[in-house]
């Protein structure tokens, strides 16, 4: 069993596939909306250098990543240990050396990694147009508008992913999450503009 | 040499891995193992199984180790079939 198969097996026996998926979407959505909010803020607050915008966004992205890793790890360690203890009581045996013991040690790390990397990777994707503009790559629209476009696309795709998970029409699900992003953008424009 | 040909075991295991995965893992211990698993009782967190393993030479220690690795607990050996075979050479 290779590392990926082993990871899948450990998630399977602990029934945590759904938790990983939920964390990915929830924190990915958090990352995308945070970046959208930051970039919208810069857009309505007047001119700022690309370097400043990138630094602010990168700072927020790193903070979201670290927050995601640490919060998920701490809570999942407690949850997995509790589940293992309950199972050990039912089995009347020590399960530390079994697959369940291994899962209690590794699954929190896997979940923490997903929870932290989802907002970080999505944020980096959204600020990629800013980096490209800074590197001198010509963009069809202004870098901030391009980043907002990527943010809206990512949020739409997260909705599509949720639609596929739930088995509902992907377009409707994508449009629903996109509407959330548009309402967020409108609120920022209304209050910060 | 005495070869173990058949074993019937009474096992307590958590719900996961499920009966199919559990049987597959036990069968994978040997090259020609045939496994038949019957779920006797299902509780909130555990299930009691009766497992019959057939093979030309069952490695009991390896089977027991595989059961323990998956979080199972061997309660008893209910049936055994062994056969003495002339040593090769």
Image (cartoon, coloured by chain):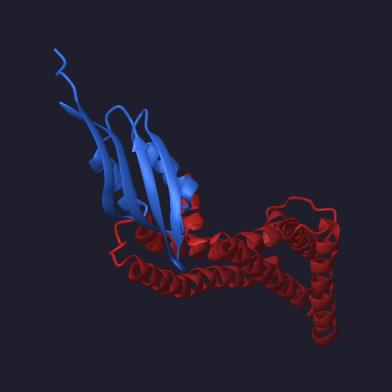
Quarter holding the C terminus of chain B is top left
The x and y percentages for residue A1 are 43, 41
Q: Nearer the viewer, residue B64 or A191?
A: B64
Question: Which of A131/A175 is in front?
Answer: A175
Position of the N terminus of chain B, as image quadrant, is top left
Residue name at image x 79 percent, y 71 percent: A181
Seen in the image, is A176 located left or right of residue A74?
right
The residue under the point 32% across, 47% down is B9
Q: Furthest residue to the top?
A: B89
Image vertical order of residue A117 relative to residue A77, above or below: above
**Left or right: where does residue A165 sit relative to residue A141?**
left
Regarding residue A2, the answer to whether it shows in the image is: no
Residue A120 position within the rendered picture, expressed as x and y whole percent measured from the top left: 59, 63
- Location of residue A100 with respect to A68 vertically, above or below: above
Quarter of the view holding residue A58:
bottom right
Please state the total of marks drawn on the protein image. 0
Which corner quadrant of the image does residue A60 belong to? bottom right
Chain depicted in red = A
Task: Residue A157: give x, y in percent of width and height.
Answer: 76, 58
**Residue B77 in the figure: left or right of residue A139:** left
**Based on the displayed image, in which of its 4 quarters is residue A142 positioned?**
bottom right
Q: Nearer the viewer, residue A117 or A50?
A: A117
Q: Residue furthest bottom?
A: A191
Q: Is residue A189 left or right of residue A83?
A: right
Residue A61 in view in this figure: yes
Identify the residue at image location x=83%, y=68%. Answer: A176
Vertical comparison of B24 with A118: above or below? above
Q: Nearer the viewer, residue B40 or A150?
A: B40
Q: Position of residue B41 (x, y in %)?
A: 44, 60
User: In the image, which lettered chain appears blue?
Assistant: B
């Amino acid at each position: 069993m290779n590392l990926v198969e082993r990871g899948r097996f450990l998630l399977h026996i602990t029934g945590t596939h759904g938790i990983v998926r939920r964390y990915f979407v929830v924190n990915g959505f958090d990352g995308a909306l945070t970046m959208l909010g930051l970039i919208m803020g810069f857009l309505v607050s007047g001119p700022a250098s690309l370097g400043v915008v990138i630094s602010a966004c990168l700072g927020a992205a790193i903070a979201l990543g670290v927050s995601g890793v640490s919060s998920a790890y701490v809570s999942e360690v407690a949850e997995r240990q509790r589940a293992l203890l309950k199972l050990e009581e039912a089995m009347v045996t020590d399960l530390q050396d079994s697959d369940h013991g291994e899962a209690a040690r590794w699954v929190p790390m896997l979940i923490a990694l997903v929870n932290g990397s989802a907002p970080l990777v999505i944020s980096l994707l959204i600020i990629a147009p800013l980096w490209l503009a800074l590197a001198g790559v010509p963009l069809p629209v202004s870098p901030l508008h391009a980043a907002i476009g990527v943010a809206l696309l990512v949020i739409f795709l997260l909705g599509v992913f949720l639609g596929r998970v739930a088995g509902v029409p992907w377009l409707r699900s994508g449009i629903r999450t996109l509407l959330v992003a548009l309402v967020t953008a409108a609120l920022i424009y209304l209050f910060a503009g | 040499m005495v070869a173990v040909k058949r074993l019937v075991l009474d096992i307590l295991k958590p719900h996961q891995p499920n009966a199919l995965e559990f049987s597959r893992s036990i069968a994978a211990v040997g090259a020609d193992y045939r496994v038949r698993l019957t779920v006797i009782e299902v509780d909130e967190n555990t299930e009691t199984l009766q497992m019959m393993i057939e093979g030309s030479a069952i490695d009991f220690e390896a089977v027991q180790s595989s059961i323990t690795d998956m979080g199972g607990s061997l309660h008893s050996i209910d049936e055994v079939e062994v056969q003495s075979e002339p040593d090769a050479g």
